[in-house]
Image: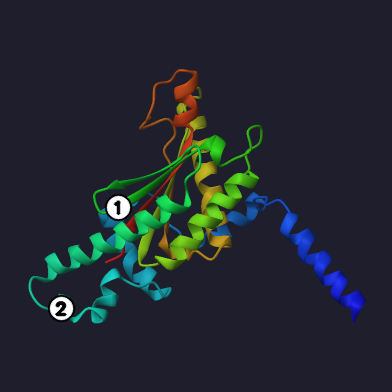
Amino acid sequence: MYKTFCALIILIAVGGCMRYHSPDRNTWGSILNGASMSDMTDTARVAKRPVYLGAGGKLITSDTHKNPAVEYGDKIANDNAIAVSYMARLEFALYDALRKPGISVQRAGTDVVVILVRDALMDINAPDISATGDDTLKTIARILRQYDATFIEIAGYTDATRDADGARRLSMDMASRVGVHMVQHRITPERIFIVGRGASRPIASQDDIGRLMNRRVEIRIAPAR
């Protein structure tokens, strides 16, 4: 019994110290089965909604019964109020949990956007998620499991030092790695959109400092309704 107990303690300790590594690229397709490799436009969300609901997804307005007052009056106005309140709570939860260098949480209308510069997310000299990035993504996944009436767009961006095709492929690689990590940590793939936007939409100049900021992954979260 004592030996079994010691072996269990050692196994837990070793497991807790293991570095996360992205799985083999050949497995990404099966892991991300159900995710959309496209922009999260309004049209795309409407088209994805039956698949999302069929996979057990829920809408923000599913919680209407908890507040009978919203059953009266203008339905669109009430739905908007529910969405604004829900997303405000999500924004605060993410902001409170992600007070780290290289990470920002912003509002974009009803949506919430988490911006992660590459160096806060991935190894400096390797295309894999770092130990710090692993911890950050686990935190985001935990919160998104709680606020599960949402769609998620994971968009990769890079700087302008590569040709357009190379930049697009690199940005898609970053976004896909984050998507795989999210699914491995119990985020339903039917909630997810993944896109690589290359060097488009820079948020800083293309000097040495600006390029570090332009290499990033943005996780945009939108209410499902």
Please provide percent x and percent y for residue 136.
54, 50
* Mark 2 element type: helix
Q: Quadrant of the N terminus?
A: bottom right
Mark closest to the chain's N terminus, 1 or 2: 2
Q: Which mark is residue 69?
A: 2
Residue toward you, 176 or 97: 97
Q: Residue 142 carries which label?
A: none
Please provide percent x and percent y for residue 52.
38, 68
Q: Count up the numbered dots.
A: 2
Q: In which quarter of the image is residue 27?
A: bottom right
Q: In this view, does 169 lie to the left or right of 21?
A: left
Residue toward you, 198 or 141: 141
Tag 2: Cα neighbours inside 10 Å, few (<14), some, or many (≥20)?
A: few
Whether the residues at callouts 1 and 2 have beta carbons within 8 Å, the answer is no
Q: Which mark is residue 111?
A: 1
* CA separation in Å, label 1 and label 2: 24 Å
Q: In which quarter of the image is residue 225?
A: bottom left
Which residue is found at the position 31% from the left and 64% from the top? 224
Which residue is found at the position 63% from the left and 38% from the top? 123
